[in-house]
Image (spheres, rainbow, N blue to C red):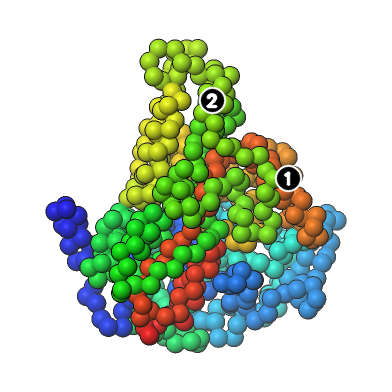
Amino acid sequence: MIRLLALLSLLLLAVPARAKDDLVIGITQYPVTLHPGIESMLAKTYVLAMARRPITAYGPDWKLICMLCETLPTIDNKLAVPEKTADGKQGVALTYTLRADSVWADGTPVTTDDVVFTWEVGRHPQSGIANAELYRRILKIESKDKRSFVLHLDRLTFDYNAINDFALLPAHVEKKRFLAAPAEYRNRTAYDQDSANPGLYNGPYRVTQAVQGSHIVLEPNSHWKGAKPAFARIVVKTVENTPALEANLLSGGIDMIPGELGLPLDQAIAFARRNDPRFAITYKSSLVYEHLDANLSVPMLADLRLRQALMYGTDRAAISKQLFDGRQPVAHTAVNPLDGVHADDVPKYSFDPAKAARLLDEAGWTMQSGPIRRNAKGEPLYIELATTAGNRTRELVAQVLQAQWKKLGIDLRIRTEPPRVLFGQTLTQRRFPGLVMYAWYSAPESVPRTTLHSSQIPAEANAWAGQNYPGYKNPRMDQLLDAIEVELDRTKRVELWRQLQHLYAEELPALPLFFRADTFILPKALKGVTPTGHQDPSTLWIETWRWG
């Protein structure tokens, strides 16, 4: 307790003094980078949603909306026009017009110059942009004027007008940095070297201070033309240890804990049972997929029988009941039952230790001498599991897995890392030698191309672009991903989704655990927070938040 109080005291001293019109938010991770296109980390998304506006996004009702554009292009309104590409394939031309009141926080208008520059960065093979596939699909951009532009895409997809990941960059700030050395750009962006530069932000707030590993301060953007922000200052404070995060809330060091990056469900349920009258608690089922990535470049994990044995040897239903009060359903694929394309008839791995043992025997891992299985060479079956440090629930789940798999003769060794290390290097550069536990946030009917397509495996040669961290390769999966994207008939598309989920469950490119429920712990005086349940976080509507 003394150590916890000492830690709490240090954390409270780490941020500026409070004022009545401040809001202090506590989250469990600090962003690896503030660059909107490099790395994929929820902590960054959560913070930047207050300081930036995407061209398109999904609203709290899960419908696609314009944020930085005036009108969504559709085939019906003729702003989306199907066209043939030079090689005779079906493409589409999309016309967007930027809002007239879109301005960077240094007063520079947001223009099509920024659009073209962002595309040039995104499609450059050495830029390190996470979702480079989006930019490579854009064959060319026509700038009709300073606000209107036409994207010519190489295919007509069912979600053709959703360009949520087109992370607009300010050309007047970033262009010189990029052109000077494209291969070094990811390490020398203004977002990380000059984070308080107002020219980087176009949302209701802008970042005015970023203290690595500690906190980020945001203040109103004086050039913002939308609804006036209610807070003079927002502090997003990082407390990676979840018990310490809760202690900060109880002591008044922070005002709220968001569901996107807050207390794990078991801890939040325990908090709710204490009925603290100062707080309102909201549970939101979400498109968050907790799972284990397996490094398929490691021979033993490349053996499907071993991965299947791990699934049969895991009592996920008991974990959900005991730790999560049954609020987090067991996942059988990466597609959430909340999503309209979910398939319920996929193969399921119920808890069956005897079947797990048979599979391990078949894979050549047998009980010889001692409690740990060994192969024909006498090598013990041990697997390393990496996950985020300070997340009590993940640490508990890892310990349960360790105990359950030990009964099968598997030596599971747990390693925790700070989130900025796990997501910044271990995952991105595929440095994990065994398994890694983390979660994916997704949008409604989000095609998992970047996580499952064989072209999306990060490597030094592609500047670590792509998010297929297991290194999964299957031509049939590639075909299904390609087919789903361009199938405009929903009934046919749902069938393709069903086939994809069956293949996923059969091949286990990752090991499914749970679909998460998010818990928002908010002061009762705070109004306007609307959980979304998908990858566009509640902070994307921060201008509606205010003290009641």
Q: Is residue 273 left or right of residue 97?
A: left
Q: Does dot 1 land on a helix, a strand or a loop?
A: helix
The percent position of residue 277, horizontal first and vertical second, equals 31, 73
| Relative height, residue 253 to residue 438 (above, below) | below
Residue drawn at (47%, 48%), measured in percent from left and top? 320
Q: Is residue 101 left or right of residue 9?
A: right
Q: Is residue 426 left or right of residue 344?
A: left
Q: Nearer the viewer, residue 392 or 55?
A: 392
Quadrant position of the C terminus in the picture = bottom left
The percent position of residue 535, horizontal first and vertical second, equals 54, 62
Residue drawn at (49%, 76%), measured in percent from left and top? 541
Residue drawn at (63%, 62%), measured in percent from left and top? 444
| Relative height, residue 416 to residue 129 (above, below) | above
Of badges 2 and 1, the one in the foreground is 2
| Relative height, residue 260 to residue 462 (above, below) | below
The percent position of residue 190, horizontal first and vertical second, equals 42, 65
Identified by mark 1, the residue type is Gln
Residue that label 2 marks: 354
Residue 255 in sight here: no
* Residue at mark 2 to residue at mark 1: CA–CA distance: 29 Å
In terms of image quadrants, where is residue 93? bottom right
Residue that label 1 marks: 499
Residue drawn at (46%, 72%), measured in percent from left and top? 539
Q: Nearer the viewer, residue 267 or 501?
A: 267
Q: Residue furthest left?
A: 2
